[in-house]
Image (spheres, coloured by chain):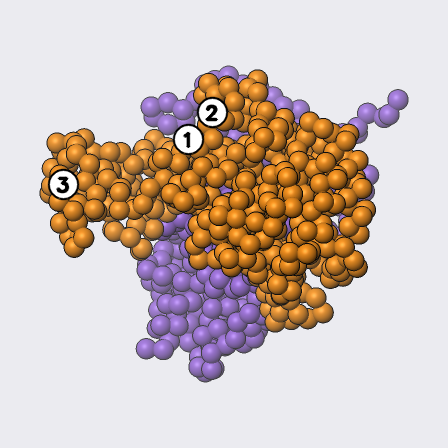
Chain colours: A purple, B orange
Amino acid sequence: MPAQPQTGPIAGRLPADVLARNFSDLHPPLSAHEARVAADRCYFCHDAPCVTACPTEIDIPLFIREIQAGRPETAAREIFEANILGGMCARVCPTEVLCEGACVREAAEGKPVQIGLLQRHATDSLMARQGHPFTRAPRTGKRVAVVGAGPAGLACAHRLARHGHDVVIFEGAPKPGGLNEYGIAAYKTVDDFAAREAAWIMGIGGIELRHEQWLGRDVRLDALREEYDAVFLGIGLSDVNALGLEGPPLEGVHDAVTFISALRQTEDLSTLPIGRDVVVIGGGMTAIDCAVQAKGLGAETVTLVYRRARERMGASLYEQELAARRGVRLIYEAAPVAVEGEGRLSAVVFERMAEGPDGLAPTGERFSLSADQLFRAVGQRLGDANGLEIAHGKVVTQGRGRTGMDKVWAGGDCAGGGDDLTVTAVAQGRDAAEDIHGSLME
Amino acid sequence: MADLTTRFLGIESPNPFWLASAPPTDKEYNVRRAFEAGWGGVVWKTLGAEGPPVVNVNGPRYGAIYGADRRLLGLNNIELITDRDLETNLEEMARVKADYPDRALIASIMVPCEEAAWKAILPRVEETNADGIELNFGCPHGMSERGMGAAVGQVPEYIEMVTRWCKQYYDRPVIVKLTPNITDVRKPAEAAKRGGADAVSLINTINSITSVDLDLMAPQPTIDGKGSHGGYCGPAVKPIALSMVSEIARHEATRGLPISGIGGVTTWRDAAEFMVLGAGTVQVCTAVMTYGFRIVEEMCAGLSDWMDEKGYRSTSDFVGQAVPNVTDWKNLNLNYVTKARIDQDLCIKCGRCYAACEDTSHQAIAMTPDRVFEVIDAECVACNLCVDVCPVENCIDMVRMAPGSVDPRTGRVVSDDHADWTTHPNNPMAQAAE
């Protein structure tokens, strides 16, 4: 008889082949023929709803037609023109609520054109076969500092470099990519894609990347404003929201973002400790990514608890179903109230919630989940405001990313107006770059 | 189950589905398997004159056009007539006919345009007990360069002359196979009839280059860097074939001449369409070359079910039934006024109707900001383009305006009377109504 799974976060719960399978590509790429067949399903809609639904407004019918016509690289250029991180977006976009959710074939038959996979087919073709597709305009002599090498920063830097400006990116982490590198489930971006994409983007030239440069610690905003003609802040949300639970400080309580980051950076998944009974608290994409990966590492039970009703969850229905398929139990309308244990976590106590006329309210009914590991995924927030105006926890911007501070633009998760998605960050970075370019060339 | 037994020129076959003279009917092995699969008849691949057999190219013979998912829509070939010895073919035909007396077996023949050549081969064919012959006046490549095939089919006088020889030296039915590579297919059909043909079959393949290799700068299929035109067939040619069949079926000089319909027949429905336009049987090639012999089961079952639904007891009940409704443009009723109607429940809001109408037609579809598409009756000329480009079946309909109502496009009251170009005031040749 096999031994009972041991309690407590321990490494190596699953053999290597099972781990490899659990973390393999969520949506394997289309073969060339599959791509032609999938492309043939596109109706080339007039004023297509999918384009309207795309935050970067990629001309989807046109690029799909280019795949149909046997030119995936031409299609890729079309995509990259609008979204230089089109390769990553093809992998991580919640297409079910964006382009594919708007596809007329979704309305007609519940089977949208596989836009995400087609975009990946196109972008993979170009990135595999050709060098960088764009060239820089003649150098302008202008210098722009971009803070943060996440999706917003990379998109901004690329567009600025294309316009002939010289860009220096200040990145706090050892690698570029931001959440693409550190914060997204491994099965969504396999084979080190985030790093390869960042390197490929910088292949345009004119971009210098400086690592281990935290804003506020290693570089100061006023100094950047002095030294550069413009500054773009794509600094994301560096702090994690707290839960404020009753009970003593216990081992086994972690932030989901730390767990995901460690998982993304490990060379060997079998070295990562994971609990036997894991509880994840939260309702966004991070919560799902955390829960599914905890299960993938071999946790016996993984329970994701969200305080509101299913339809209020930040993660899409598709993501919720993915989690359920992968063996995650989802509990809705329950909020954590306390952790229990002696030194180490042993249980989490929840209270049932109900949505009433005055909003979410506790019902008084409590239940307890035994747990040896708890992940908090209840959102992130902006760190130091660096003297910028903040509203609703985000840097206030106007127009195409202009902050109230002279020479400073912002975009991505740190700024308002987005949905905390890679694709909206790319759109904001790109648009801010155009605005910066316009203002520098006045 | 409706009885599919078909009598064509007195030749009985258990169904109207014959295999056309082509690679599938080149030898005993194939034809036996076709008959076992259920084909009603075959036209044996074209026999040439006695002597050294023809040679084929040793590179690719076929090229294709595809629809979605590599669905084969058109096939082009540069294969010649049978490259097997005449004696072998004749022996095999005799054996097969003896073993399958209930199936139609027709010999396709192509020999030089000399009386002696025809006089020599016809008795040999007769000995096989084949039910009839088909004169290959259609093959557009290779053999036509040697004065045979389409080179004969393009000269009505030659058709008439050779047909006459065949009727003189052969006692069984003579079918003349026509080439579509001609301006007016009625002329060769008339010539065949004048020569005494019992029937015509059409269409043979259409001159074609299916594609060009943009690296080699050469047509495909490419043989050592060169390509020549081939003969095009398959679903893509069906509309051309249907029109040509109907022209012969309704033309005064050829009306009543039996027709064997060929050109892109792929399903029972294609067959039924050829038959209601006047074809007594149909011949199939590309569909079996794509899917194999078994498709005849679908064809038999589909045609039979359709006949049951419609109450037809024999194929002769519906052959030619649509011919009276094929007419000249000038006879079309100009008082038949329709308007496009979009079913908003079925509409999936793709906007293809809008793009097509707005960009290329009459600006007769309005689009609201929330993607509701409505027809503007005052602009709609009822061209049907929106129906044709709509990806949803039956979503857009052409609805006839009731007589007595006013067409908002013209401001005129819709009349119940027939009125066509022959009586239209703008027609300088108009005849006053009696």
Q: Spot the residue most to the front.
A: B168
Distance, label 3 to label 2, CA atoms, is 36 Å
Please tell me whether residue A160 is drawn above or below residue B406 in the rendered image.
Answer: below
The percent position of residue A140, horizontal first and vertical second, equals: 44, 81
Secondary structure, mark 2, is: helix
Tell me whether marks 1 and 3 sit on the same chain: yes
Among numbered discs 3 and 2, the one appearing first in the sequence: 2
Tell me whether marks 3 and 2 sit on the same chain: yes
The percent position of residue B423, horizontal first and vertical second, equals: 17, 45
Please name whichever residue, B430 or A271, is drawn nearer the observer in this view of the structure: B430
The numbered mark at residue B317 is: 2
The percent position of residue B165, horizontal first and vertical second, equals: 60, 50
Circle 2: is it few (<14), some (14-19), or many (20+) Cα within 10 Å? few
Please name whichever residue, A28 or B53, is drawn nearer the observer in this view of the structure: B53
The type of residue carrying mark 2 is Asp
Disc 3 chain ID: B
Secondary structure, mark 3, is: loop
Q: Is residue B9 visible?
A: yes
Residue at the disc numbered 3: B433
Q: Along the horizontal axis of the image, is B90 left or right of B423?
A: right
Residue at the disc numbered 1: B321
Circle 3: is it few (<14), some (14-19), or many (20+) Cα within 10 Å? few
Distance, label 1 to label 3, CA atoms, is 29 Å
Residue at image coords 13%, 39%: B434
The type of residue carrying mark 1 is Gln
Callout 1–callout 3 Cβ contact below 8 Å: no
Residue A88 sits in quarter:
bottom right
